[in-house]
Image (tube, rainbow, N blue to C red):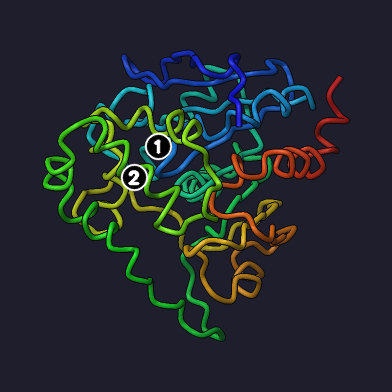
Amino acid sequence: MAVPAEVVTPLRIEVGPGHHLAVRRRGEGGVPLLLLHGFPCTSRIWAHNLIPLAEAGFDVVAPDLRGYGDSDFAPDGFYDFNAFNVDLLGLFDQLGWDRAVVAGHDLGAMIAIDLATRHPGRVDRLVILDDSMPQLAFADLPPIDPKPAVYDYVRQQGLHADELVAELATPEQRRRYIGEFYGHRLWCPPDAFSPEDLAFLTAPYGDAARLRASFADYEVVMGTRPLSAPELTDRPVDHQTLILVGTDQITLRNHLEERCLVAFPNAVGPFWDRGAGHFLPWERPVLVNRAIRSFCGDLLNSRP
């Protein structure tokens, strides 16, 4: 899938003293829309969404999270939800945004959920592009299914990050490792990504420091990295929320519809995309763009 040349080069915006995020932006002056990537991605995963959503009337901003892509590394060493959101609020202020629609995928979805809870007035509505949700106790539902063996990377990245980076000694090895998440780890259908796609998406991870920074979230998950503040993902989110989920991925948890009713009481969805996997912004960009445009039609129509 050819990447539009206009979205390849990001801007750099200072979001704190001497601290910059790399940002891809299109449609300045439209309805504010923040697109948040997860692992193993960067803002490049939104390459097929930026221009169509800008043409629909959004001011579309896709940052690289701290430590990822072309953004600065964490100046304070923190890579938890609050730390990411400190940067994002700084970005809002630099852009002149009071509030925004926030769309998130994977880690980006959890950051969006935390942002909506921690700073509810800054989030207009949410778009969740996988089965991410607040970590609640669902008393009337069976436990979440145990994770399969292909989740071995969680322990490796969370408990043995330095050793793993040392084993991946060359840019090619590092990029191949990241490429596996688009392949045999079963996060998406076979052959969903071409060699050209993978070359574009994995390019930032050729750098050892970038790869190491991306493991920090897994250290948070495994309890080996301190938090800058408690993560606010332990309660339902009341914002209007659109949920889209690809069915063909091993990352899915059971009883998703029932859990969403509790976690997102004002949700539209979840809507299932049969045959798509974990990477909806890239695998199904036309669907994602249309869904966001429809979900926010009232906001778009209210703009002069």
Residue at which label 2 appears: 80
Q: Amino acid at mark 1?
A: Phe
Image location (x, y in percent) of residue 156? 21, 56
For the point 39% across and 53% down, the residue is 231
| Mark 1 in CB contact with mark 2 (< 8 angstroms) | yes
Image location (x, y in percent) of residue 264? 64, 62
Q: Secondary structure at mark 2?
A: loop
For the point 28% across and 63% down, the residue is 152
Image location (x, y in percent) of residue 28? 68, 15
- For residue 82, side relative to residue 96 (left or right): left
Residue at which label 1 appears: 84
Residue 79 appears in which quarter of the rendering? top left
**118 in relation to 293, above or below:** below
Q: Amino acid at mark 2?
A: Asp
Assess disc 1: are there few (<14), some (14-19) or many (≥20) residues with their C-alpha within 10 Å of its C-alpha: many
Image location (x, y in percent) of residue 64? 44, 29
